[in-house]
Image (cartoon, grey):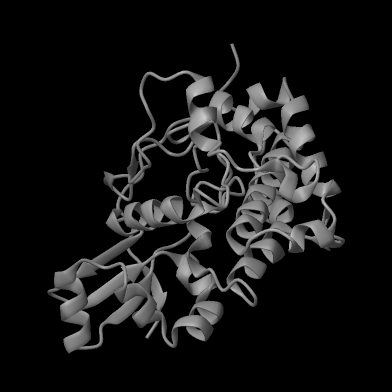
């Protein structure tokens, strides 16, 4: 039996953790078929814009909060096939894709390479390994070299300016959002972004408003990506307002709240499930 790696339990900071609702009884073939929304493959020559190999990995080794890194390590061919295909796509063909298809490609490439790098170091036991994985500039894609971090920053800056993309990115730390249940395409990207933002903002371990203290506590990822958010949305508060409940939105519009950040859990995912206690936010924002 392979060892399944898990995000820490079904709670985060003492609350029920948000999640995408995966089907409880469903075949891997059905998940793959749902993900492949009849995307024409001739747009990029022989490149598979349905990402069938990546969908195979996500369908067989990823579910809810769990990633079976040991299982992936025992069957690397689909993951390596997917990475090889993405690496072989030329810049000219990439630029011929629609903007949503380009974004989907970059997010899929980030997550596929992250899986490969974590599996190569498995079992990961130190936060320093996760930091090296994220900052290592060893990804060849569309004619240039990237790190996972530089790929994520590229998504949020010109020409994409998609600041919501962080909710679809996972690099093997416990504090990361979950991997998408299937590969992104130009067709399913926007619905997945909308769904993931809704779940992210409904998780009080990521976003929580204390009306008594008038404090808005938010994920540290908003601090990491604050500069592109403010470039694209004027202020962090205006960006947050788009996704907050109406009552909270009204309260912070009438009086500017103090912003605090939850600590980011950069420790590696392990096969041991732990319950997290409620953590206080740290540091000042505004």
**173 versus 52 height, above or below:** below
Q: Nearer the viewer, residue 34 or 261?
A: 34
Observer-nearest of 164 and 121? 164
Dividing the picture into quadrants, the one containing residue 210 is bottom left
Q: Residue at x 58, y 71 (%)?
A: 156
Q: Is residue 102 above or below residue 58?
A: below
Choose between 46 and 274: the one closer to the eye.
46
**Residue 27 visible in image:** yes
Image quadrant holding the C terminus, namely: bottom left
Residue at 46%, 66% (x, y): give it: 220
Q: Residue furthest top?
A: 1
Query: How many numbered marks have been drawn onto this rendered protein structure?
Result: 0
Based on the displayed image, in which of its 4 quarters is residue 9 positioned? top left
* Residue 34: x %, y % from top left: 48, 33
Left or right, 231 with respect to 215, comes to right
Residue 227 figure quarter: bottom right
Residue name at image x 51 percent, y 69 percent: 163
Drawn side of residue 21 relative to residue 90, left or right: left
Tell me residue 204's x, y (percent): 28, 56
103 relative to 208 in the view: left or right? right
Task: Provide residue 264's location: percent of width, then percent of height.
Answer: 48, 59
**Residue 123 visible in the shown view:** no
Left or right of 136, for residue 25: left
Q: Give the residue displayed 74% in from the left and 37% down from the top.
A: 82
Q: Quadrant of the N terminus?
A: top right
């Amino acid at each position: 039996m392979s060892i399944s790696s898990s995000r820490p339990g079904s709670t985060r900071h003492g609350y029920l953790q948000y999640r995408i609702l995966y089907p409880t009884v469903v075949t891997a073939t059905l998940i793959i078929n749902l993900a492949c929304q009849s995307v024409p493959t001739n747009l990029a020559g022989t490149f598979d814009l349905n990402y069938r190999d990546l969908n195979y990995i996500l369908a067989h080794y990823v579910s809810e909060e769990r990633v079976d890194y040991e299982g992936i390590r025992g069957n690397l061919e689909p993951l390596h096939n997917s990475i090889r295909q993405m690496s072989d796509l030329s810049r000219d063909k990439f630029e011929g894709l629609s903007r949503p298809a380009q974004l989907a490609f970059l997010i899929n490439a980030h997550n596929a390479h992250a899986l490969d790098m974590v599996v190569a170091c498995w079992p990961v036991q130190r936060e320093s390994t996760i930091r090296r994985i994220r900052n290592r500039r060893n990804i060849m894609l569309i004619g240039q070299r990237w790190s996972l971090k530089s790929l994520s920053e590229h998504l949020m800056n010109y020409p994409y300016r998609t600041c919501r993309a962080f909710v679809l990115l996972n690099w093997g730390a416990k504090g990361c959002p979950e991997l998408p249940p299937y590969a992104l395409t130009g067709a399913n990207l926007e619905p997945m972004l909308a769904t993931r933002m809704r779940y992210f903002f409904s998780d009080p371990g990521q976003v929580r408003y204390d009306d008594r203290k008038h404090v808005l506590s938010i994920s540290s990822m908003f601090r990491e990506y604050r500069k592109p958010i403010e470039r694209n949305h004027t202020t962090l508060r205006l960006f947050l307002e788009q996704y907050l409940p109406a009552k909270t939105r009204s309260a912070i519009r009438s009086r500017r709240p103090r912003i605090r950040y939850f600590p980011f859990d950069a420790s590696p995912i392990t096969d041991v499930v732990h319950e997290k206690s409620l953590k206080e936010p740290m540091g000042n924002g505004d």
